[in-house]
Image (cartoon, grey):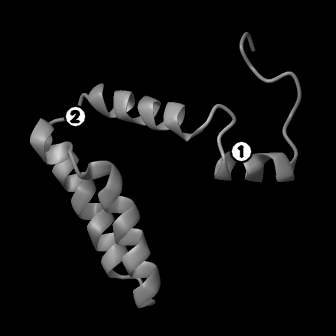
Amino acid sequence: MLLGRQRKLTGAERLRVALWPTRGWCRSLRYAIAARGRLHATPHAVALGLAAAGVFSAFQPILAFKCWLLRLLRWPTRKLAGRL
């Protein structure tokens, strides 16, 4: 692989990178926003995907988990309605 890692990450290193990205949250968020801007789906397909995520979160049995899951699902899509 041309631009791959030199060595495999251990389990602890993978957990650390998942909780705190190597180059920081700002860069990761900018990349996620740019990737969302390159979305080539129709508004109908995006709406179906969001509806599926909502149905998934509605069937969670623990109320606290459901609330946190809805907050996590709402956060990246809060400005999506204005872009369609």
What residue is shown at x 35% (from left), y 74% (from top)?
Answer: 57
Q: Quadrant of residue 35?
A: top left
Q: Quadrant of residue 75?
A: bottom left
Marks 2 and 1, Cα distance to the nearest angstrom? 30 Å
For the residues bearing labels 2 and 1, Cβ distance under 8 angstroms: no
Label 1, secondary structure: give it: helix
Q: Which residue position holds label 2?
A: 41
In the displayed structure, 63 sits above or below 69; it is below
Identify the amino acid type marked 2. Ala
- 57 with respect to 81 (left or right): right
Identify the amino acid type marked 1. Val
In the displayed structure, 38 sits above or below 24; it is above
Label 2, secondary structure: give it: loop
Q: Earlier in the sequence, mark 2 or mark 1?
A: 1
Q: Which residue position holds label 1?
A: 17
What residue is shown at x 13% (from left), y 47% (from top)?
Answer: 81
Tell me how many marks there are: 2
- 70 with respect to 12 (left or right): left
- 13 with respect to 25 (left or right): right
**Front-lying residue, 75 or 2:** 75
What residue is shown at x 35% (from left), y 60% (from top)?
Answer: 73
What residue is shown at x 17% (from left), y 52% (from top)?
Answer: 47
Residue 27 at x, y = what percent?
52, 31
Residue 26 at x, y = what percent?
50, 36
Please state, as top left, top right, bottom left or bottom right, where the N terminus lies in the image.
top right
Mark nearer the viewer, 2 or 1? 1
In the displayed structure, 84 sits above or below 37; it is below
Q: Quadrant of residue 50?
A: bottom left
